[in-house]
Amino acid sequence: MRVELDVNEVKSLFERSSHQDDVLEGLYRMVIPEWDRIEYIVEGRPHIGEVGWRTIFSLFEEFDEKHHGDFVFPGYMWLGLGFLLDKELKAWEVDTSEVKYIFKK
């Protein structure tokens, strides 16, 4: 499934969150409509266009420096668990077709 993220909605998510986990979960919620029904992700990560990926990475770096200081490497959560950069996608387009998950019973 492909969706287009709204840059203003993404920036708002960073502004109203106080922890990296909240931001990352919020981004997944934006692209996987059935997020509340998912038990866990088995494999895969969403892919996003280059402009979106780089913008979100920068936002994570700023967020980490503001909220977590020297306790974390700025942007590490996006690098480790965030979406994968895909130059074939439009700027803010996200493809979740490779994400496999199990629903709650």
Image (cartoon, helix red, strand yellow):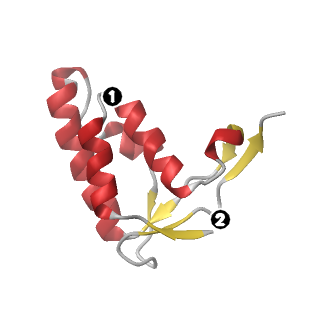
Q: Is residue 55 left or right of residue 89?
A: left
Query: At 26% from the left edge and 26% from the top edge, which residue is drawn?
Result: 72
Amino acid at circle 2: Ser
Q: Position of residue 51 (x, y in %)?
A: 29, 69
The C terminus lies in which quarter of the figure?
top right
What residue is disc 2 on? 97
Number of disc labels: 2
The residue sitting at 33% across, 28% down in the picture is 19
- Residue 39: x percent and y percent? 71, 35
Label 1, residues with CA under 10 Å away: few <14, some 14-19, many ≥20: few
Quarter occupied by the N terminus = bottom right
Give the quadrant of residue 104. top right
Depth order, front residue of 73/56: 56
In the displayed structure, 59 sits above or below 69; it is: below
Q: Is residue 83 left or right of residue 62?
A: right
Residue 69 vs 40, above or below: the answer is above
Q: Residue furthest top?
A: 71
Mark 2 Cα-neighbour bin, 10 Å: few <14, some 14–19, many ≥20: few
Name the residue at 27% across, 59% down: 8
Q: Is residue 50 left or right of residue 41?
A: left
Of callouts 2 and 1, the N-terminal one: 1
Q: Are marks 2 and 1 in contact (CB under 8 Å)?
A: no
* Whether residue 40 is situated above or below residue 13 in the rendered picture: above
The image quarter in which residue 61 lies: top left
Question: Gap in Å between the C-alphas at discs 2 and 1?
Answer: 27 Å
In the displayed structure, 10 sits above or below 73; it is below
Position in image of residue 95 (x %, y %)? 55, 67
**Label 1, on which residue?**
19
Q: Amino acid at mark 1?
A: His
